[in-house]
Image: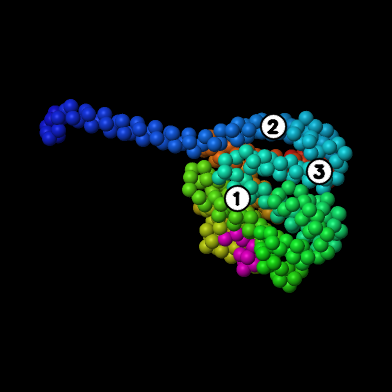
Amino acid sequence: MGLEEVIPWISYDMFVTLLILAGLLIFLSVIVYIIKYLIDNAPYAYVNARVRGMEAKLLDDHKFNELIEAGSLVEVIGLLEDTEYSRYISTTSKDRFSIEKSLDMHLAHIYKTLAEISPEKAKKVLKLFEKRYDIRNIKTILRAKYAGLDGESTFKMLIPIGTIPENRLRELCEAKTVEEVVTGLEGTEYGKILSEKLSEYEEYNNLLPLELALDKYLYHSLWRTVKIEGANEDIFKEFIGKMIDVENLKVILRCKREGVPSEVTLNYLLDVGYELAPWKLKELAEGESIEGVISSLEDSEYGNILAEHLEEYERSKSVFVFEKVLDNYILEVGKRLSLRQPFGVGPIIGFLTSKEMEVKKLRAIINGKIEGLSPRDIKELITN
């Protein structure tokens, strides 16, 4: 059957013309998509070039093996002299606190640098990550006042990076009580958050309500910021959403291990997330055991990875087993998102997750050396 018999109302030449026009429309649509993609990602070209340079300085497996096998803390610090950590950790650093503070200073500098050079939309998210240092400093001051420490001792424990000016931090350190710290934060974004939970602190004489209020504020701020349109921002939304899921799971698992009532556990949770909706969180919080929680997660990625380590938990009875695997999961999510969007915000997320994990491993190695753990024990702590 010929073409004319199938469509007798159109000539062959006209059909070919329409076919060519359709091809041109498809071609133009592809070109428009490519141009839009390039326009969306062009602002990330410079920052991703910088990120690639930073990635080249990440510690490799050989360096980590050297650090693990080092005979002493001094030797560990010596092995870090040819890395970028040498700017922060000196050979005179001997105590755990000063070394951990140095690691935090380095990490804070990374976030600050990336926030300064990133496009505006990514900058908003990275600036919020910087606020973790505000929250960490406030928590440190609250704990110090709770323990009755003086102003100078308190200030030495702070990481003077964030949105709270150094002179304000010094004033807060001079407060005598937890209540005075909360009063001293009036006029800041953290003051109202803490004042609303002050009565709970006074009733139970426990800092947990204040600390959880700060954590919730940060993650809610992050979630609100990433709930915007655009491919790059969708990547951030998925990453931060999964971070919130993981934080909620850690709280639930800890509470189950400690026998905390479900109604109390629910107060500790963030009511936002990516895969875990509020109704699901309620179901998990009401689970009778850790095994029950994991069983309720069987249809999610989280359930699969936690179930694989259930036997290890049964042997150790420590939720650290699950916390470690969840942290590693976030690292894998970062790497996955980096590959999904290699010319946009993906590399920033991939690098930051790798950097966070690197610092966490260094912290474990340093603490292991201080506590006299064997290389084998330290390796077990940091191995995936």
Residue matched to label 3: 99
In which quadrant of the rendered view does residue 94 lie? top right
Q: CA distance from mark 3 to mark 2?
A: 20 Å
Seen at 86% across and 54% down, the residue is 152
Name the amino acid type tagged 1: Met
The segment highlighted magenta reads 262-271
Give left or right: position of 307 versus 183.
Answer: left
Provide the secondary structure element on which disc 3 rests.
helix
Q: Secondary structure at mark 2?
A: loop
- Residue at 77% x, 51% y: name it: 166
The kind of residue tagged 2 is Lys
Does the segment drawn in magenta span residue 269?
yes
Going by the numbered disc 3, the residue's amino acid type is Ile
Q: Is residue 222 magenta?
A: no
Tag of residue 362: none
Task: Give the residue pinned by disc 1.
Answer: 243
Q: Residue at x 71, y 71 (%)?
A: 199
Residue at position x 86%, y 36% from top?
91
**Residue 32 point in image, percent of width and height:** 40, 35
Q: Camera-side residue: 316 or 55?
A: 55
Instruction: Say whether residue 241 is visible.
Output: no
Which percent across, then down, holds residue 311? 65, 50
The residue that disc 2 covers is 57
Secondary structure beneath label 1: helix
**Viewport quadrant of the N terminus:** top left
- In 3D space, how far apart are the residues under numbered discs 2 and 1 (Cα atoms)? 25 Å
